[in-house]
Each structure stands twice: as structure tokens, then as C-alpha cells.
Image (spheres, rainbow, N blue to C red):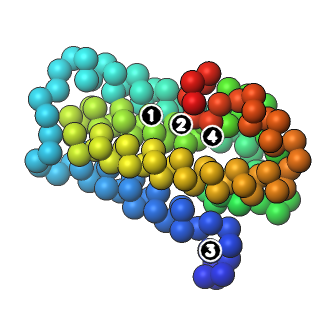
Amino acid sequence: MSSDTQTSRGGWWVVGQFIILAMIVTAGIIRGGHYTGGLLSTVVGAVLCLVAVGFGWRGFVTLGNNLTAFPKPLDDGQLVITGVYAIVRHPIYTAVLCGSAGYALLTTSWVGLVLTGVLGVWFEFKSRREERFLRERFPTYAAYAQTVKKFLPRIY
């Protein structure tokens, strides 16, 4: 992929998210930066990981050929607002955040939890860029965004 294409499609947002994800995984593996976890941490972490798998899988399947990691939609892409996309506008981001938080809880990594927060902020700004592309491309996106929350059903 050329540097121009990388920039125009929002590729640096993708690079950044994978760097943060690598840091979360590393934080769970290395010694130090851990807290004493208990049953609650394990249960909540496991539940979040299961939610991540469910939301992520449904997001991937529902998007089908429209799937791209870039904020800019594919040239021949269609607007998808059904399935899990009728629950939240960015279910794959929700899945990644739930999975990251769950992993951090399961590995008792406070550093991983902090980095999950950083990833959440990253996804907030990436999704804003993505939604500008979507509004430009699909006239009905604005109405959809008024009725469906961004990351958390009925909350945000």
C-alpha cells in the first residue's frame, strides 16, 4: 500500500491501534505492573472476553465484504445498519475494548487496564474520523447515528 493511500484511508489510525494492542498484550505478560486479583477480577474478565468474542464475531459476519480496518469505507462498500450494527455503531471497537479490558483483568495488569483506557480514547477519535467519512458517503448515516449509540448499547 502506498504512503498516500495509507494516509488518505486513515491507515495511521490502524497502526496506532495495533501498537496500543501490542502494549496491552505485553503488559499482561511481563512481570511488574500487576495487582492481586481475586475471583471477581477473574469472573468479570472472563465475561468481558466472552462479550468481546460475541460482539466481534457478529460485527465481522454482519459487515461481510464491507469489512476494513481503515476509517474510510471501501469504494464499493455499503452502509450496514442491521444485526449488531442496530445495537451499536462500532461493535468491533466495542469487542476489542471488552477483550482488552477482560485480558487485563485476567492477567491482573493495572498497566493493561490503563492502556485499555488509552485504546478507548484512540477509538473515540478514530470513530469520529470514520463517521465523517460515513456521513460524506452515506446521506442516511446522520439519522442512523442519532438513534444508535456509538460503543455501549443505550449508554454511549
Where's the C terminus, which quadrant?
A: top right
Q: Is residue 51 left or right of residue 3?
A: left
Residue visible at 21% across and 34% down?
A: 108
Q: Which sits in the foreground, 104 or 133? A: 133
Distance in Å between CA atoms under marks 3 and 4: 21 Å
At label 4, the amino acid type is His
Q: Are marks 3 and 4 in contact (CB under 8 Å)?
A: no
Residue visible at 63% across and 51% down?
A: 128
Q: Residues within 10 Å of mark 4 (few under 14, many from 20)?
A: many
At label 2, the amino acid type is Thr
The residue pinned by badge 2 equals 94
Q: Are marks 4 and 2 in contact (CB under 8 Å)?
A: yes
Q: Residues within 10 Å of mark 2 (few under 14, many from 20)?
A: many
Q: Which of the marked residues, 1 or 4, is nearer the chain's N terminus?
A: 4
The residue pinned by badge 1 equals 98
Q: Is residue 22 left or right of residue 52?
A: left
Whether residue 116 is visible to the viewer of this picture, yes or no, is yes
The residue pinned by badge 4 equals 90
Q: Is residue 9 left or right of residue 55?
A: right
